[in-house]
């Protein structure tokens, strides 16, 4: 055989070796979730690639069989060429082996595999068209090789016949959403993260605490009650006697505002307009309560502990806010300063602060930043006090009686 033909066959072997090496990396680097999406869209190459990847043992056996055969054949050709060129020099065989190794490493291994890892689909889908018929052609050899492979893997407790399905747990899915800034606005990211957190959130995490509940005390005089109704920023108010624990019902302002200016308006009129109060155990999951609100067609309820004492109040808006976050709130609870620090309203819940700042402050104990600070310091800190709270340096800006009102998180150096 002339040298020109030998060189031509050698170059062909290098190209085929690059194909097998690159296609192996490309098929194994395919994004399985994008692949499923393309299969649903009836992409021909994706359909064949998915079929091949359902049995990775057979696919790898085929690719390695072809790659090893071609590399050995190329090495034999290089030896024949070296002998033809330098019949009197025995060291030329070793030199040709070294040169061929370097050439194959660059052009048939590293380059195609790097390209395939960066751009897997352009190589994987065309290669799948080649591998499907090729696998049928050499299936007996692949089956024989995989027979021994299966026996060896069974010894170490691996069954290749059991197909594995890629699945994501909640934390992995949250990581994917967090890293999708290039294709999704940040506000939608937070909405999706809020939905994923619904399962672990309870009513206690999102309720308005007892001391912040705005309501009407029927023990007050009628003039005071009318003023509270007219000046209320809320659409529904809890109505009670002396204490919120003695709640009578909820008053919808839409029903009462048309009556407050009438001379006959009195406390009995208010009582007649009340709706029955709904009580919610504090450990109720948020998604469960959302379904209850929907089924019972109510929008507000009082949160009670195991003794029946009122601990707070929750509305349908609170539940929705757990999903959409700051999209429906007018309160600016976290404000970034020019020096990189953050002014934070200490009444913010720990869950919301974690979501806004992408932190991991503990949520098992106190539900608000104020409670977390007080539990950590075991006292009510004075303004100007500085602490390091779970790895975050902060300064107390203001307090009100027995609560922290505003803090400043210092920038990390």
Image (cartoon, grey):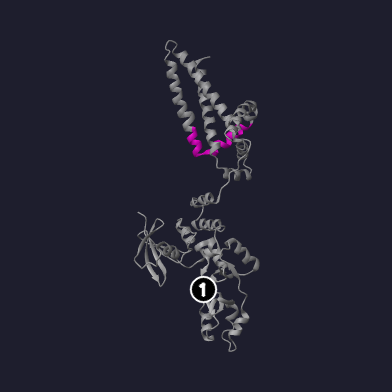
Magenta stretch holds residue 341: no
Residue at disc 1, secondary structure = loop
Residue 100 horizontal/vertical position (percent):
46, 23
* Residue indicated by mark 1: 213
Between 333 and 163, the one lying in front of the other is: 163
Classify 10 Å Cα crowding around label 1: few (below 14), some (14-19), many (20 and above): some
Whether residue 59 appears in this view of the structure is no
The residue depicted at 50 percent of the width and 66 percent of the height is 329
Between 191 and 106, the one lying in front of the other is: 191
Image position of 295 (left or right of 379): right
Quarter the C terminus occupies:
bottom left
Whether residue 87 appears in this view of the structure is yes
Quarter of image, res 387: bottom left
The residue depicted at 51 percent of the width and 80 percent of the height is 228
Image position of 351 (left or right of 400): right
Q: In the displayed structure, would residue 173 be above or below residue 68?
A: below
The residue depicted at 43 percent of the width and 18 percent of the height is 94
Q: In the displayed structure, would residue 269 be above or below residue 24?
A: below
Q: In the displayed structure, would residue 61 be above or below residue 340?
A: above
Between 298 and 94, the one lying in front of the other is: 298
Between 359 and 340, the one lying in front of the other is: 359
Instruction: Read off the magenta span.
Output: 112-132
Q: In the displayed structure, would residue 277 be above or below residue 339?
A: below
Residue 199 horizontal/vertical position (percent):
57, 57
Residue 111 horizontal/vertical position (percent):
47, 32
The residue depicted at 52 percent of the width and 86 percent of the height is 223
Magenta stretch holds residue 128: yes
Image position of 197 (left or right of 374): right
Residue that protrudes farthest toward the front in the picture: 307
What secondary structure is the magenta-colored segment mainly?
helix
């Amino acid at each position: 055989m002339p040298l020109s033909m030998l060189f031509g066959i050698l170059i062909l072997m290098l190209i085929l070796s690059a194909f097998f090496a690159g296609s192996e990396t490309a098929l194994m680097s395919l994004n399985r979730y994008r692949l499923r999406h393309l299969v649903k869209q009836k992409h021909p190459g994706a359909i064949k690639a998915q079929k091949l990847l359902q049995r990775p043992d057979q696919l790898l056996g085929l690719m390695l069989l072809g790659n090893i055969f071609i590399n050995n054949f190329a090495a034999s050709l290089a030896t024949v060429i070296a002998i033809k060129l330098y019949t009197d020099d025995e060291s030329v065989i070793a030199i040709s082996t070294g040169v061929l190794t370097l050439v194959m490493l660059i052009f048939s291994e590293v380059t195609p595999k790097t390209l395939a890892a960066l751009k897997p689909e352009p190589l994987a889908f065309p290669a799948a068209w080649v591998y499907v018929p090729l696998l049928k052609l050499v299936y007996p050899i692949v089956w024989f090789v995989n027979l021994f492979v299966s026996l060896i893997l069974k010894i170490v407790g691996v069954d290749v016949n059991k197909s594995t399905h890629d699945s994501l747990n909640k934390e992995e899915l949250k990581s994917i959403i967090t890293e999708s800034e290039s294709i999704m606005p940040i506000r939608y990211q937070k909405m999706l993260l809020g939905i994923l957190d619904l399962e672990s959130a309870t009513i206690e995490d999102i309720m308005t605490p007892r001391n912040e509940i705005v309501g009407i005390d029927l023990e007050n005089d009628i003039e005071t009650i009318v003023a509270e109704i007219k000046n209320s920023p809320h659409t529904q108010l809890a109505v009670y006697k002396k204490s919120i624990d003695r709640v009578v019902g909820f008053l919808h302002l839409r029903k009462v505002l048309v009556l407050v200016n009438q001379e006959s308006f009195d406390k009995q009129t208010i009582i007649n307009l009340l709706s029955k109060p709904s009580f919610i155990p504090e450990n109720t999951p948020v998604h469960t309560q959302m379904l209850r609100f929907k089924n019972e067609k109510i929008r507000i309820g009082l949160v009670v502990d195991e003794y029946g004492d009122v601990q707070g109040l929750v509305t349908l808006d609170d539940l929705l806010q757990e999903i959409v976050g700051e999209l429906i709130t007018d309160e600016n609870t976290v404000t970034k300063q020019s020096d990189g620090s953050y002014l934070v309203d200490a009444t913010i819940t720990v869950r919301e602060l974690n979501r806004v700042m992408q932190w991991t402050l503990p949520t098992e104990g106190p539900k608000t930043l104020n409670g977390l600070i007080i539990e950590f310091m075991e006292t009510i800190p004075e303004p100007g006090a500085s602490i390091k709270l779970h790895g975050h340096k902060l300064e107390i800006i203001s307090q009100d009686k027995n609560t922290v009102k505003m803090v400043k998180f210092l920038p990390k150096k």
